[in-house]
Amino acid sequence: MMALKINDSLNRIEKTLKILFVICLCFTVLSHIRKIYISNQNTVYKSNIEESNLQLLSDPKGIISLELEGDNSYPLLEVLINGELVKRFDNKQIMIEVQDRDVVEIKGTMYGDEIKIRIIDISSEIKNQNMMQQVSINRNIVSLGVVRL
């Protein structure tokens, strides 16, 4: 009878130790997974910062100044860079920031008037200073050219 109580007690202690071992093992594994996750997050964050800094260094920008000729205003007239809207002619003169190999276009499909736009200034970073200096738009999209920096 005494031997049965001792065996029963030993079995309970053994089960308790097994459970504690599994809990400690799970805690250790989860702790390592957390460290790996935090390490990867820091690596991704640092690489994103380095990548954006490299882009700032490697992607020089230029500026093109455009002006509407005439007295009319055309607030819906759009300037597109690589097919994406970047600015509207809210004023008679606007400035747009461009990068190397950007395609600059003027979209006037919403107006039936003949609209004349001219380039009044091109920053010195832009190598091809021979972009179209003046364009006429009449319900179409006109390309000013491809920027070369």
Image (tube, helix red, strand yellow):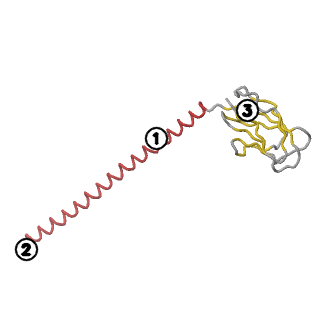
Element type at marker 1? helix
Q: Is residue 70 left or right of residue 80?
A: right
Residue matched to label 3? 63
Q: Which mark is residue 43?
A: 1
Q: Nearer the viewer, mark 3 or mark 1?
A: 3
Frontmost of labels 2 and 1 is 1
Residue 81 appears left or right of 5: right
Residue position marked by numbered label 2 in the rendering: 1
Taking 21 as reference, is 86 above or below it?
above
Q: Quadrant of residue 78?
A: top right
124 in relation to 71, above or below? above
**Which mark is drawn over residue 147?**
none
Label 3 residue SS: strand
Under tag 2, what secondary structure? loop
Sequence-first disc among 3 and 1: 1
Disc 3 versus disc 1: distance between alpha carbons? 35 Å
Q: Residue at x 83, y 48 (%)?
A: 139
Residues 18 and 42: in front is 42
Depth check, front residue: 10 or 128:
128
